[in-house]
Amino acid sequence: MTRTEFDPGRVWVVKIGSSLLTNAGAGLAVEAVAGWVDDIAWLRAQGVDVVLVSSGAVAEGMARLGMRERPTSVHELQAAAAVGQMGLVQMYESHFQRHTLHTAQVLLTHDDLRDRERYLNARSTLRALLELGVVPVVNENDTVVTDEIRFGDNDTLAALVANLIQASTLLILTDQEGLFDKNPRDHPDARLVEKARAGDQTLVEYAGEGSALGRGGMITKLEAARVAARSGASTVITAGAREGVIRRLH
Ligand code: GLU
């Protein structure tokens, strides 16, 4: 077992959302995950530590339990998440094993990050895991929180984790190209925003113009970028489906 000193300057938080992780309700997108895991293993070999924030538990649980519709009862949703989380960690564990990398399951809630003692505990554990060369796989602890206080699809959770470990970069992989200045479906001249300052109100206006599908999603991502910037992290919001996406950004 080798230990390296924790260095926040070379820590990335990589967030993968449910829509990328699941094959339209038919279980986990195992091949796509294999690609991201290969990229993360490569990143680690370049000296970058990675904390993975992954959703997909509810979606995978629904597939495993044969639920065609998303449950409306919070407890059924939580039950689905508990079942699906098993599939999620199994998948990451086996893919990272190909690179002889260990993974660790870390489940967090808002309360864990608000309470000082728990916050410091979570921070120390994540640091210890990184020093041990492990890839932490973080998700929300869906079992213990009600719908109103859930992080939902984890953009905010990923930003808070970036604060927690003072990551240099927050990478949000999504099913869209990124943020456009207008809805690209209605406006062929829509331009992709290449670079901007987190917290710039114009960006929120752009996101409001975005596609119906990604509307709420993009605003949450911009808010995540603003939160991550508080501890100095730069955020990249980009299409996760592009091959080698993580490598190309390094
Ligand atoms: N933590 C949840 C998951 O991993 C968020 C996604 C959702 O609410 O569907 O599935």
Image (cartoon, helix red, strand yellow):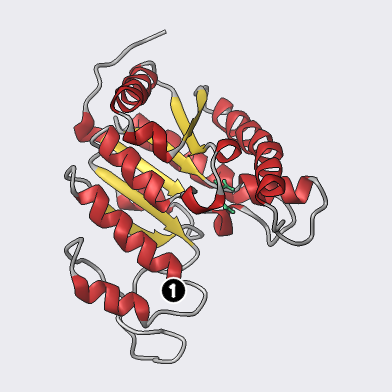
The quadrant the N terminus occupies is: top left
Q: Is residue 137 visible?
A: yes
**Residue 92 shown left or right of residue 77 in the figure:** left
**Residue 215 shown left or right of residue 229 in the figure:** right
Q: Is residue 161 above or below residue 175?
A: above
**Residue 232 shown left or right of residue 169 in the figure:** left
Report the residue at 50% width, 79% height from top: 212
Q: Secondary structure at mark 1?
A: helix
**Of the pair 67 and 133, the residue shown nearer to us:** 67
Please state which amino acid type lies under the numbered disc 1. Answer: Arg
Q: Quadrant of residue 19?
A: bottom right
In the rendered image, which residue does mark 1 sit on?
215
**Residue 177 shown left or right of residue 17 in the figure:** left
Residue neighbourhood size for the residue with mark 1, other residues' Cα within 10 Å, grouped as few (<14), some (14–19), many (≥20) = some
Q: Position of residue 93 (x, y in %)?
A: 59, 29
**Of the pair 160 and 187, the residue shown nearer to us:** 160
Q: Residue furthest right?
A: 66
Report the residue at 78% width, 45% height from top: 64
Q: Position of residue 169 (x, y in %)?
A: 27, 45
Q: Is residue 228 above or below residue 214?
A: above
Q: Is residue 136 above or below residue 128?
A: below
Q: Position of residue 209 (x, y in %)?
A: 37, 83
**Of the pair 101 and 211, the residue shown nearer to us:** 211
Q: Is residue 30 visible?
A: no
